Image: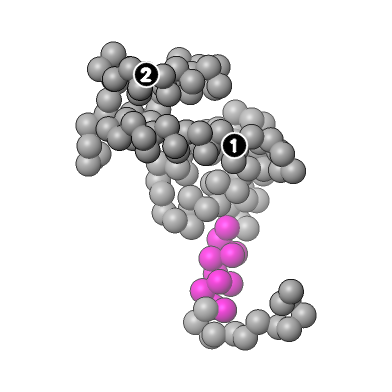
Amino acid sequence: MATVSLIEYEDASAEVREVFDDIRRVRKSDFINNFWKALAHHPETLKRTWESLKVVMAPGALDALQKEMLYIAVSIANNCDYCIHSHTASAFAKGMTEGQYQELLAVVAMAHQTNALSTGLKVPVDNAFLA
């Protein structure tokens, strides 16, 4: 259950509608997901988060699919159910295959396991790994 109500487009302020319109334009969709509707309670946070996301998720040295897959991995690590679902859907829409998804999950699971072991054992970092 959400801790805030979701602000629909027709109930939004002009400032929020401007961001919602940009989301629709950039994503080439009329869909505004619940994350943005929840953030709409604080227009400054909505706008700042959307502007940052556009920059970070734009193709660069990493392509859009790679970035979505990284987002899935971090969302799993942070236990963010919403982001796991939304970025998995986005990754599949950007061409992620079922095989890639299963391999991604295997890597995330292995990283969780080895991170826990290394943390529990307080393994000192090898000098060769330090810059």
Q: Position of residue 34 (x, y in %)?
A: 35, 30
Q: Amino acid at mark 2?
A: Arg
| Residue, disc 2 | 17
Q: Quadrant of the C terminus?
A: bottom right
Q: Position of residue 83 (x, y in %)?
A: 45, 42
Q: Say which of 61 and 94 sits in front.
A: 61
Left or right? Give the position of 36 relative to 52. left
In which quarter of the view is residue 37 placed? top left
Q: Quadrant of the N terminus?
A: top left
Q: Say which of 20 and 107 sits in front.
A: 20
Residue found at the very far right of the displayed protein:
128
Element at label 2:
helix
Checking the image for residue 55, the label placed there is 1
Badge 1: residue crowd in 10 Å (few <14, some 14–19, many ≥20): few
Disc count in the image? 2
Per the rendered image, the range of residues in magenta is 108-118
Checking the image for residue 128, the label placed there is none
Q: Is residue 117 above or below residue 40?
A: below
Q: Say which of 10 and 71 sits in front.
A: 10
Residue that appears at 52% across and 78% down: 119
In which quarter of the view is residue 79 placed? bottom left
Residue that appears at 53% across and 17% down: 25
Cα gap from disc 1 to disc 2, whole angstroms: 20 Å
